Amino acid sequence: MSRKKGFVQYVGKTPIIPISAKILAVFVLLLLLSNFMTNFINIQLNKKETIKLTNQILVDQLKEMYTAATNQFEIYKYSQNRDEALDAVSSSARRSFTQEASLAVGVEPTGLVTFSTSDIFGDGFTDKSAIKQMNAAKNAGVFEGSLRFQTEKGEYLAVYKYHEDWQFYLIRADLVREMEAASRHVFLVITIIIICLTGVFLGAGLFSFRNILKYIRQMSDSLHEMQNRQELGLINLEGAPNDDVTYLGASFNALSSSINNLLGIFQKFVSKDVVNKAYSDHIIKLEGQQRDLTILFSDIRGFTYMTETLGNDIISLLNIHYDRVIHRIHENQGTIGSIIGDAVLAVYGALDHPELKSVNALQCAWEITRVTAELREKLLARRAEIEKERNLTETEERVFKAVLIDVGVGIDGGNVFYGNIGSAEHMTNTVIGDNVNAASRLEGLTRIYHLPVIISQYVKAEVEKYSDKYRFFEIDTVQVKGKQIGKKIYLPLEKEAVDEETLAKWKKYEEALDAYYEGDWRKAEAEFKACGVDAADVFLERIKGKTVPEGWSGIWAMTTK
């Protein structure tokens, strides 16, 4: 129970010491630190004046260089010894140097260095932006000025003037680091003095201050980490004093535990992006927008037989399957749009890196087929072990056949509605659009063509734009139920998995497909029979004993979903 006695708050028998008393003690230290800041500002202002004075000195020395260069050009006209004349200009410039890294250099507008008092430039002036700046000024009729340029030694402050006779820029520069050395030295001395005085008068106070605010820093760090992780946690209050800050931390921990429990439940029922938005905005609204997303639809084949055979045990099997599938979806930056019995709809592009949505969806599709294949292999291995001792009974055969999960995956994408629909009392996050339905239709086609994954032209184009991992084989051009136009569908295979034999089969298949499109069904039938691809059986059945219909477009119209 909390009670107040005088100016002190009590929780039970424990007094909560006001934090204001501790902050008051800190105020004395802040006054001393203000002296340090004042001196720091003073040094910065002096540094500006130093740069201004240095610039003036450089201008005077540049004038002397320019005069020397003019005189040497006159000598050069008679002697025709260019190198000797430029060496004389360089020697004249050196006599006025005040720093170890002082620099004089002649630079042509092309960046070629004609002479230099240093060997840092090699074959040319390294800072192209400085050359560009001087050339731009010269083209505008300004032949002198100041600039800064970078070298391997650091940044230089420079003044320059274009010499019409020599046709190069005369540059006189000093290293900024050396110019600021004196200011840094003064600043260092003042800093040492302030630190010493602070240490003498407030050494004991600083020690107490660090201990007093230790748990405030600990709490702040913990809260900052929680914000970065987008999840609540507990603040470590071990050894904390009995003041109002500790009481605040303890209250936060109690609230955090309750919210974390509710948030953990919430995360299991909604997609990750909705959780993140609810955490950041502290509200979920009935809203949505048109977005360019990729939709993955995965369904279990033969689910009716599985349900009839396994009964209530189908739930356990589905949970094993979805535990693997949903993990892969999240791992590849996808979100769960919905789970409907034996089917799962995943959305890509709602989280990070939306440009890779189709690449991530396709990667996930093959991972889903692999994990289901691994599960089937384990069951087949288990069956082999049992059959070493005895044959399976008829009931066991039915159960074994029912648990051999096989899936088909269809992927399509495009502009869809994505957001929350429902009412203020109950809402759900969903994705709506023709491309969502198309992904479901493509999954249905995996059963017809006996293929694990089928994708649309949209997905193919986007994957090819961002990845070279896959090779695509055209399967057919179909017109799904409810649509008026045909769409090409493709089988995506990882290039590493396409050996010479597989490539030869699919090339033969594509040749047959071209003949089929062109209406040469006799040739197509022969090619389909010879290709060795399972999907060819669909065409053989489709054209067997038939003639090409009038107005043939090469598009097969689906009559079922």
Image: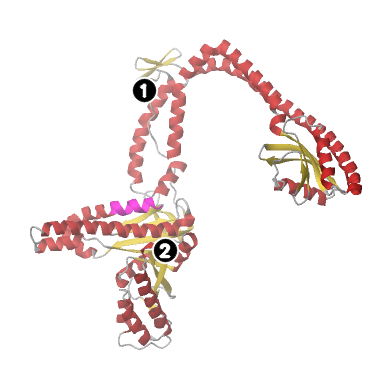
Point out which mark residue 470 bears. Answer: 2
Task: Residue 202: give x, y in percent of width and height.
Answer: 55, 12
Is residue 142 at least partly visible in the picture? no
**Residue type for callout 1:** Glu
Q: CA distance from mark 2 to mark 1?
A: 55 Å
Q: Is residue 230 above or below residue 35?
A: below
Q: Which mark is nearer the camera, 2 or 1?
A: 2
Task: Residue 165: give x, y in percent of width and height.
Answer: 87, 48
- Disc 2 on helix, strand or loop? strand
Numbered label tally: 2
What secondary structure is the stretch in magenta mostly built from? helix
Is residue 279 at least partly visible in the picture? yes
Task: Residue 420: give x, y in percent of width and height.
Answer: 42, 53
Which span is picked out in magenta?
Answer: 322-332
Query: In the rendered image, which residue does mark 1 sit on?
Result: 238
Task: Residue 471: give x, y in percent of width and height.
Answer: 42, 66
**Residue type for callout 2:** Tyr
